[in-house]
Amino acid sequence: MYDGIVQELIDEFGRLPGIGPKSAQRIAFHILQTPSFDVKRLAELLTEVRERVRFCEICGNVAEQERCAICRDPRRNAALICVVEDAKDVAAIERTREFRGLYHVLGGAISPIAGVGPDDLRIAQLMTRLADGTVQEVILATNPNLEGEATASYLSRLLTSMQITVSRLASGLPVGGDLEYADEVTLGRAFEGRRVL
Amino acid sequence: MYDGIVQELIDEFGRLPGIGPKSAQRIAFHILQTPSFDVKRLAELLTEVRERVRFCEICGNVAEQERCAICRDPRRNAALICVVEDAKDVAAIERTREFRGLYHVLGGAISPIAGVGPDDLRIAQLMTRLADGTVQEVILATNPNLEGEATASYLSRLLTSMQITVSRLASGLPVGGDLEYADEVTLGRAFEGRRVL
């Protein structure tokens, strides 16, 4: 279709998540019309990110050093660990500015269909972190879907024998949402979790 | 939110057309988990495409040499020129395998709102190509929207004085579409352009 190398670039972009063939083509043509300098910067950034960024040896979050910025911060409450599936979830929670504890990134959720079992997740590392008795509460913040719920209940069973409070993020109506448009399961959860005023 | 360089990469991806902040984040995390080798390849391809690919000096299509693969092909019919807005349109028409002539890429369409006039398009170059009398038909294949129609009617007026057939791609119902869902303008065009069987 296109002279070889342009098609190659389109194919490479098409391999990125969430980019279909049409978007890939649009991006490739955008690159052709972008100043050389900017393209070079993107290219260098790609290589640099891949070389410099790794995952925190404690919590599994993205980091430029051995430990991530959150694990290095002495002002964070080390008695509180929030367990999430993915490093993207850490960023989402940080945006709320509600949580001042530490994180633990599992790297996914238990899913028999996708062939992901407890051993494929960073659960052993979590148990090691909990062993010295510093942590008083573990907040299970896995996604409120089938896999996330399965992972949360697996972890909560695993933690019952320890002297640690285990909690789960509340399910209910999204703020700013419309009751009318809530699905039954969410609405049911909102009733279950109702609070006396 | 993220350690500096990851956020920088997210921002860079977010600047590409059709990629919102969520997609940009997803792509950046995908890059972090992609083998170094593949990321390096994408980075090199980006720089290489930007350095090697240019626009054909005759038709304005993407090319790796001074002239594009289509203009260099002696089997193409040089008496027939298809005028399109964008190099992406060349690829779309090539996919049909219906057209064996040459192309002329305008680089956009006339749009008073966007401040694009005839002088901003490769119209002078088109007139130069038509001057030697080789071309017998010009097919106006600009988009069937306001800007594309304006550009087509501007060009057709410009070409009336020359001994050249000027044609426009047919408008009508899309093949495989449903009459019920066609908008009025398209359906009206389909009536206007009806053919005796």
Image (cartoon, coloured by chain):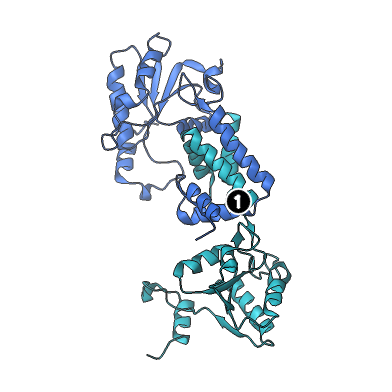
Chain colours: A cyan, B blue
* Residue depicted at 37% across the width and 76% down the height: A179
Q: Amino acid type of disc 1?
A: Ile
Residue B169 at what x, y percent from top left? 39, 30
Judge from the rendering whether residue B181 lies leftward or rightward of residue B20; answer left or right. left
Farthest residue toward the bottom? Answer: A196
Residue A120 vertical placement versus B195 (above, below): below
Residue B83 found in image quarter: top left
Decide: few, some or many residues near mark 1? Use Cα within 10 Å; few <14, some 14-19, many ≥20: many
| Residue at mark 1 | B31
Farthest residue toward the top? Answer: B132
Q: Secondary structure at mark 1?
A: helix
Residue A151 vertical placement versus B97 (above, below): below
Residue A8 at what x, y percent from top left? 60, 36
Q: Disc 1: which chain?
A: B
Residue B59 vertical placement versus A20 (above, below): above
Residue A6 visible in image: no
Residue B81 visible in image: yes
Residue B195 vertical placement versus A67 (above, below): above
Judge from the rendering whether residue B42 lies leftward or rightward of residue A183; answer left or right. right
Front-most of B109 and A153? Answer: A153
* Residue depicted at 31% across the width and 29% down the height: B151
Residue B120 at what x, y percent from top left? 33, 27
* Residue depicted at 26% across the width and 38% down the height: B113
Residue A73 at what x, y percent from top left? 56, 68
Front-most of A19 and B1? Answer: B1
